[in-house]
Amino acid sequence: MKTTLDELLALTRVVDTGSITAAAEQLGQTTSGVSRALSRLEEKLEVTLLRRTTRRLELTEEGATFLAQARRILASVEEAEEQMALRRQQPAGRLRVNAASPFMLHVVVPLVAGFRERYPQIELELNTSDQIIDLLEQRTDVAIRIGALRDSTLHARPLGANRLRVLASPAYLARRGTPQSVDDLAGHELLGFTQPDSLNQWPLRTADGDSWTITPSLRASSGETLRQLALEGGGIVCLADFMTAQDRAEGRLVPVLEAHTVEVRQPVHAVYYRNTALASRIGCFLDYVGERMRV
């Protein structure tokens, strides 16, 4: 498109005010600037829009036809800007969120009803993946990631951190006994992750340091699967607090080796591309989740 909005605005203001000088005052521009804008517009269209006399300006037939279209274009732009302003006040549209299934189930899902009540025009689409995904390939607007971040091409926002604890069910401990030292774990069923290996480093203090790498008796890709196995008495597990808070409160899982446990907190981040056009929707969602994670 050759014509600019500034040129359309100059034309409509000149017609509405009846003079280039008055239009320039309204637009906060110089008289010569408005005059040049009109001249450029006529050159681009290759028509005369205004007849200039010593006493007044008159629209030509072509000018009257073009003016009607120009007004519609400017009105549409103004309406679009108003809609964007309203969206900033009341965000709307689809927001695709991805998170590991345990975080989705234990943190996001309980917040959905309240979030939808506050932001009824945002259409949430929730997807789960226990592996790191490509946001573009999976058509994801924002992903929640737990642990250290490695992808520097993404914009990251911290949401909080969760402590790791070594846990087991009372039924398992009654059957197999309660370990009193880290070395005692060698005689127990240890529930660990298939990948990454870093998740099988438990925050236990030994003579070699503040981390102890387990050899799992049983592996699973999902923390939720490991939680269920632990609840069923399948062994000892190391999981984040967000996943086990209610289990611990109700005694279904109890801490193991507390005296040997180092306080380690896994960071929780939301990640999204820096050039996203969904900043308003993402900001509302992350504010809502982050506030409640800090409670």
Image (cartoon, rainbow, N blue to C red):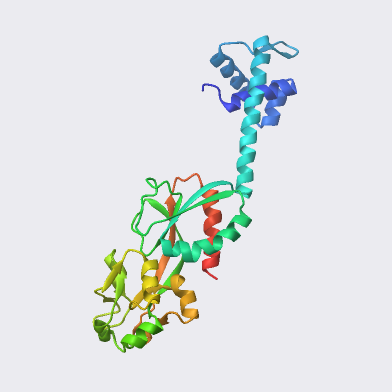
Q: Answer yes or no: is residue 275 visible.
A: yes
Where's residue 276, x and y in %?
Answer: 47, 46
**Image quarter in which the C terminus is found:** bottom right
Residue 79 versus residue 212: which sits nearer the camera?
A: 212
Residue at image location 64% in from the left, 17% down from the top = 66
Where's residue 140, x and y in %?
Answer: 43, 49
The answer to whether 46 appears left or right of 200 in the picture is right
Write down the quadrant of residue 252 in the picture: bottom left
Where's residue 108, x and y in %?
Answer: 50, 61
Residue at image location 28% in from the left, 65% down from the top = 194
Residue 15 versus residue 100: which sits nearer the camera?
A: 100
Residue 215 versus residue 49: which sits nearer the camera?
A: 215
The answer to whether 234 appears left or right of 25 in the picture is left
Q: In this view, does 55 lie above or below 129?
A: above
Where's residue 34, x and y in %?
Answer: 63, 23
Residue 81 versus residue 27: which sits nearer the camera?
A: 81
Residue at image location 34% in from the left, 54% down from the top = 151
